[in-house]
Each structure stands twice: as structure tokens, then as C-alpha cells.
Amino acid sequence: VSRLVDALGRKALFALDPETAHGLSIAALKAGLPVGRRPKPDPRLATRIAGLTFPNPLGMAAGYDKNAEVPEALLALGFGFAEVGTLTPLAQAGNPKPRIFRLAEDGAVINRLGFNNAGHDAAFARLSTLPAGLGIVGVNVGANKDAADRIADYEAGVLRFAAVASYLTVNISSPNTPGLRNLQGREQLAELLARVAAARAASARPDLPVFLKIAPDLHEGDLDDVADAVAAHGIDGVIVSNTTLSRKGLRSVGRDEAGGMSGRPLFARSTAMLARLRQRVGPQRALIGVGGVDTVETALEKIRAGADLVQLYTGMIYAGPSLPYRIVSGLSAFLDREGLSSLSAIRDTRMAHWAARPIA
Ligand SMILES: Cc1cc2nc3c(=O)[nH]c(=O)nc-3n(C[C@H](O)[C@H](O)[C@H](O)COP(=O)(O)O)c2cc1C
């Protein structure tokens, strides 16, 4: 039945332009439409990183629920955690429409939204009303396009959301805010993370986990800098990765649209980056693998490449709202089949393989 709901929903939503379809899917979740079901809780899937216990390792990636409208509904679909945002201090409209493109033949999406969001205040108001014990809700923060001091926008995000977030993500990897990715360079990254760490120390939750989200378009040397900087400033983990500027291997007509590409063709590149970063940060630091996850097997492969946790977004556009249920139940079935008591047993087992793969 859930696959039928997925197929019908997909047919209806794909008749609409992608941004309208996205708005409708948020409205459906908000209205409490029964579009999915929670997988059976499985203690073997619980993952403890950065002082948090995730009930299962699959999360909703940032960008779907930009304004923190439906975190409860996302958790009810089976996700072990939901990341809302990216949120900027002031509301902003983002780039002119159309700005989301389906590349159906490739199982991919290109977006150039440009941090359209309702701003800190609106999201804070919603997050403050969430019931205690709801589950893990991360808040992804960014900078306004016109900010005079972009790093100050990240500090503001940390101070604002520390009291209501399970963790914070510092997103400097969107390709759609001109110059934002420059914050990934060695000097700027050091200043950013020093100021973020100071803001956290001064916030309501000095022990709040903070993750850094990076692009899949970095060079090996940049990865060395990222590994050094997160260690130097006590950043708890890294999310690998955001969307790519690469268009390699795409066949769909929309492939020349400007923006960041996500989905199936991002899998190999983001997984190769993840494994390279795992080699550099060592076994302790938390890594979250994102990019092209759309099946149990791709989720498992992220873990084998070095991920503690996995997130997805584009996969759900194509596979429908039962995808988290199917992946999470599939992870339990995998543990049964292999006779394993946790997924940590397979982490890093294919790190060397993925790290040696050329970045396509
Ligand atoms: C339409 C769209 C909007 C996105 N917006 C954000 C965002 O606001 N902040 C962010 O950190 N990532 C954003 N992302 C990136 C995703 O969180 C994720 O890193 C990327 O899409 C790769 O995962 P996927 O292949 O499973 O989609 C967005 C992705 C898409 C497709």
C-alpha cells in the first residue's frame, strides 16, 4: 500500500513544477496526511555520536524543511533525526523562479534556491513549541546574502538556536550564495570555526554538538584543512556533502541549469569525499554521509565508507515518503541476515576502497 501511495503521489506531484510540488508535500505533512509509517524500533540501530543517541542512523537532510514546519511529521515517517534550515538571521526571498529542476532520467535535481527562508524568528517560534522528548531535530544555519559580516550571521544562529536545537550545522557549502563556499578556505574556516566555538561557549548550551557541512567539490588539500580546523576548534562532526557543481555523466535536458546538483549521480563523488575525510579525521570524529542515498544498499555503503549517520533528500523526491520506512526496516533486516548487533561493525570497512576512487 505504501508503494501505491508513493506511486500515486509521485504521479500527481510530478505533474506540477518542482517548487509547487515541494510546497504541497509540506502542506500534506502539516495537515497530518497518513503518508508513511514508523519502522519498528530497533535498539541495534541506535547510534551514539557527539553525546546524542540517534534512534536510527537515517536523517532528513537540510533544505526540505527549511522553516522548521514539519519536524514531527518527518520523524513520524521513520527518520531517526530531522535537520531543518538552512536558516538565515533575516528572512530572504532567494533567487528568481524557476529555481528547482528535476533531472528525472538521472534521478537527480538541480537547485539554485539561494537560501530562501523565513528567517530566525519564525523558525525559533516553531521550534520552541515542539514537545520535549520529540526526537533529534538539528538546526542548519547560514548567512544572509547581503550580510556585511557573514561570520556574524553564523554566530547569531548558534546563539539563537542553542536552546531549541539537538545539534547545529554550520552550512558553508551552498553553491547558491555567491562567495559562501570561500568560507571553506583555510584562513576563513579557522576564523569562522573559532567564532562559532566562542558563540557556542557563550550560549545557553556550551555542550551543544556543532557539525560543519562541506561541499563535494573540495580538493585533497582543502580536506586536510577541514580536518585540522574541526579538530582545532572542537567541532563535533562533519556532514559530507552538500550539492555539487559537477555535471559529469548527466543525460537529462535540464543538466545545464545553474545551481547545485543532488541525487543519484552525486553518490560516488560524495562517498569518495566522505572516505577521504574519514581517513583524515580518524575513527572518533562524527561523520554524516549525504548524497545520492536512495536504497538500503546505498545507505549501508555510506557507513562502510566511513559514515556514522546518513541523510537524504533527493531520493525521497523520486521514491516517495515511504523511503525512510523502507531503508530503516532494511537496515534491521541486514543486521538479522548478517547476525550483527550494530552497524558500527561495518563502518569504515570500505573506506580504503572509496578513498582510492578518483573523484568523478
Ligand atoms: C531543493 C534542495 C534544497 C536544498 N537546500 C539546502 C539547504 O538549505 N541547506 C543545506 O545545507 N543543504 C541543502 N540542500 C542539500 C541537501 O541537504 C543534501 O546535502 C544534498 O541534496 C545531497 O543529498 P541528496 O542527494 O540525498 O539530495 C538542498 C538540496 C535540495 C535538492
Image (tube, rainbow, N blue to C red):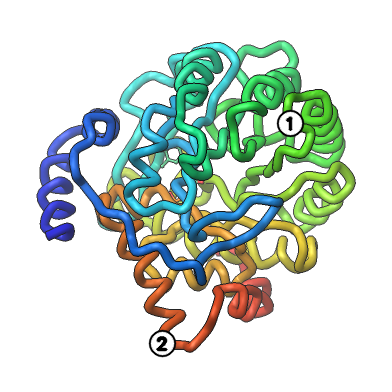
Give the camera-side residue of 210 and 92: 210
| Label 1 crowd (10 A; few <14 / some 14-19 / many >=20) | some
What amino acid is labelled 2 in the image? Arg
- Decide which of 263, 28 is in the foreground and name it: 28
Q: Is residue 347 above or below residue 312?
A: below
Task: Report the residue at 84% width, 41% height from top.
Answer: 186
Count of all numbered marks drawn on residues in the image: 2
Residue marked by disc 1 = 205
Mark whose residue sits in front, 2 or 1 = 1
Viewer can see residue 217:
no
Viewer-closest of 20 and 345: 345
Question: Where does residue 232 sit, x and y in percent of width and height?
Answer: 89, 46
Residue 58 x/y as whole percent: 47, 57
**Residue at left 49%, top 25%?**
127
Looking at the rendering, which quadrant does residue 207 occupy?
A: top right
- Of the two numbered discs 2 and 1 on the same chain, state the one appearing first in sequence: 1
Residue beneath label 2, please? Answer: 337
Secondary structure under badge 2? helix
Q: Kindly tell me whether residue 40 is visible in this rendering.
A: yes
Seen at 46% across and 23% down, the residue is 129
Q: Position of residue 100 (x, y in %)?
A: 34, 34
Q: Secondary structure at mark 1?
A: loop
User: Is the C terminus in the top left, top right, bottom left or bottom right quadrant?
Assistant: bottom right
Decide which of 6, 342 is in the foreground and name it. 342
Quadrant for the N terminus in the image:
bottom left
Percent of width and height locating residue 223:
76, 54
Tell me the amino acid under the disc marked 1.
Answer: Arg
Q: Which residue is most to the right?
A: 232
Residue under the image location 53 percent in, 19 percent down = 124
233 to the left or right of 222: right
Q: CA distance from mark 2 to mark 1?
A: 41 Å
